[in-house]
Image (cartoon, rainbow, N blue to C red):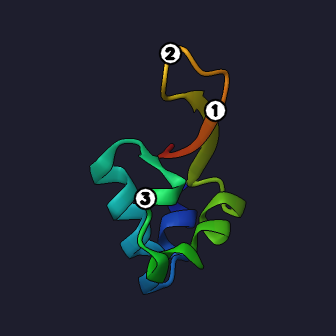
Amino acid sequence: MGANGLKDMSPSERQLYEYIKRAEEIMVSNIPSRMMGTLPHLIRKGLVEVYKKQTVPWSSKKKKFVRAR
């Protein structure tokens, strides 16, 4: 992540980025719907990463999470 990526953010991208950064990691489904549209832009710029992990030990199902890089 370069400083250039942070400077080129729109206000809505910056708002979502700060939201994710404060939460440290957040389940994608818990991101407010009004902010959801800017998530692909942050992923494309390399500012956040999406990964899957188990939330319940006895289930093999995994949920998508996102965190700031």
Query: What percent of the width, then of the height, locates residue 46?
Result: 65, 53
Mark 2 and mark 1 in contact? Answer it, CB < 8 Å: no
Inspect the image, locate mark 3, and give the three-letter code of the amino acid beneath it.
Asn
**Relative vertical location of residue 37 with respect to residue 42 in this rendering, above or below:** below
Question: Earlier along the polypeptide chain: callout 3 or callout 2?
Answer: 3
Residue identified by numbered label 1? 62
| CA–CA distance in space, label 2 to label 1 | 10 Å
Q: Residue reaching furthest left?
A: 22
Quadrant of res 16: bottom left
| CA–CA distance in space, label 3 to label 1 | 15 Å
Q: Residue at x 35, y 51 (%)?
A: 21
**Relative vertical location of residue 17 with respect to residue 65 in this rendering, above or below:** below
Helix, strand or loop at label 1? It is: strand
Inspect the image, locate mark 1, and give the three-letter code of the amino acid beneath it.
Lys
Residue identified by numbered label 2? 57
Q: Residue reaching furthest right?
A: 44
* In-front residue for pair 59/46: 59
Quadrant of res 42: bottom right
Q: Residue at x 30, y 49 (%)?
A: 23
Residue 24 badge: none
Structural crowding at the residue carrying mark 1, measured as other residues with C-alpha within 10 Å and reported as few (<14), some (14–19) or many (≥20): few
Q: Residue at x 27, y 52 (%)?
A: 22
Quadrant of res 8: bottom right
**In this picture, residue 54 sits left or right of residue 44:** left
